[in-house]
Amino acid sequence: LTTAALLLGVSLIWVLLEARSPTEEPSVPSAATSDRPVLVVLPLRDLGPEPEPFVSASLTVEITARLGQMAPDRLAVLAPTAAERYRDREAPLSEIASELGVDFIIEGSLSRSRDRVRVRILLVRAGDETLLMSEEVEGGTGDLFALQRAVADRAAQVLAKEILGLEAAPEAEEEVAPEAYRAFLRGRYFLDQRTSNGLMRAVESFREAIGIDEGFARAHAGLAQAYALFPSYGLAMPSDTLPVAKEEAERALKLSPNLSEAHTALGWVRWTYLGDPEAAERSFRRATELNANDATAWQWQAGPLVAMGHFDEALAAMNLALERDPLSLVLLTGRGWVSFYARRYDEAARYCQEAWDLQPAFAYAWQILAQARAQQGRFDEALNALDRSLALEDQPAVHLDRIDIQARSGDREGAEKAMRKLLEDDHRAYLPPFRLALVYESLGRRQEALRWLRTAASEMAYDWGLAAVDPRLDPLRDDPEFSSLKQKGPAQADGESLPGPAKELEGESP
């Protein structure tokens, strides 16, 4: 499909939403309950003299992934972030089980001496703290993959036979080169941080893994997910990285057709780049069929549902994601973002509050809070929230958000001054066109706003895909030119020479 298909899809969504009241608030569904037993893998403690955080964290992630993919229809496995708060906290297993709502717990340790590594794990039934398994493996420092696989396979076999009533656990994936696996672990570690710097380092690590072992499907899938997120963090234009994400996801699926994270990445690309929400839905559905414990698959599935105004379904998908990873900062703020589009602003703020109660330094939570409070006219709170975000992570796109809200609060003069400074300080930075459009609309420059919205459409910007339900665009909905823009394809946008933001602020003609 072409960019024209994306614009057609967005236009159709607008038509479907015309009769919907912009203030309609759908009810929030309860997350689906499950009678599957629930397991959590606690963070492995690194007992070495010089701990490497990513090694123990990544091994925890890999053991969790192995068990989560074993029989997702019969066993729920919480994501590693659900147990992260117990990394440096001593607590009885019964207390942990009660707080997390789990039936089984795996805990363990990692120790190293010279060129040897020892991994020890225990599988405990939480209710009566019965020890079901104690396993210890040892090997060279270059054998991390083999050690992880041995421990995870042993745990999988015990769970399969003793808990799930299976004859045997499914086979694990084929082995890869140890150096490639180590680079992959770093990539997953950085990808899960969900920061600009983390995404860039994730790409480096995944590329390193692929360079060592071209047939490493999970590294291709990880690279696809990282590149898929670049535009959302203002790191690149969608047209620069989403085609690469598509290629990497397809490559991963050729190597491993049942790899859930590859289907998840392809689903995101099918929606944001190819403009095909139905195909995206098929990819996400396949991902959750393969691994119902994949929280990211449920989270990303919410995107096209929001775009089509299916807020109840989107909220349900986010709730399912949170069931699998209840303490994830990304999921808590993502749930708040869905609430924002559903125009449930206090609810959005509440999820942001839950996120920064866990980690006050998570910048994204402050950004979503700012948007929710701005829609309520609580501009001082919104600006303060963005200041907190910028103090944590200085992003040009967030500066645009601040300028937008500053102008909406009535301080247009200060907003224009801030915009000039941003362009002087970050003249080489990529400024998302959708955010620029919001700024110019708030500054009273409607034509510039429309031009940048057209650019957002031609670039296949993520925000443009949600324009049909974005409350920040409400002031434009009665504008004939805006209505016309909704019906235009990218050819009209691509054929225009768009002015740079600096010239527009100076009042020069395009």
Image: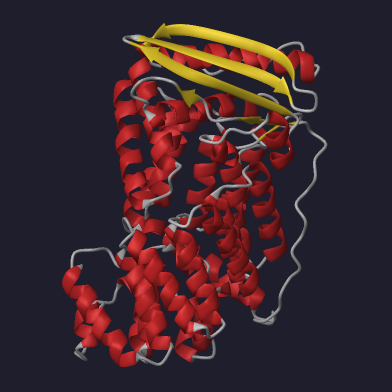
Q: Is residue 120 above or below residue 323?
A: above
* Quarter of the image that includes the C terminus: bottom left
Quadrant in the rendering for residue 448: bottom left
Scheme of colours in the image = secondary structure
Q: Is residue 211 left or right of residue 128?
A: left
Residue 401's place in the image compared with 462, above or below, is below
Q: Residue at x 33, y 24 (%)?
A: 50
Residue 324 sits in which quadrant? top right
Residue 432 visible in image: no
Across and down, in percent, residue 8 comes to: 52, 68
Q: Residue at x 49, y 61 (%)?
A: 365
Indicate left or right for 448 with 373 as reference. Answer: left
In depth, the one of 360 and 327 nearer the eye is: 360
On screen, residue 19 versus residue 414, left or right, reads right
| Picture coordinates of residue 179, whole percent (x, y) | 33, 19
Q: In the image, is residue 151 above or below residue 469?
A: above
Residue drawn at the location 27% of the way across and 86% of the way down? 416
The count of marks equals 0
Residue 502 at x, y percent in the picture: 20, 80
Residue 180 in view: yes
In the image, residue 83 lies at what x, y percent?
Answer: 59, 37
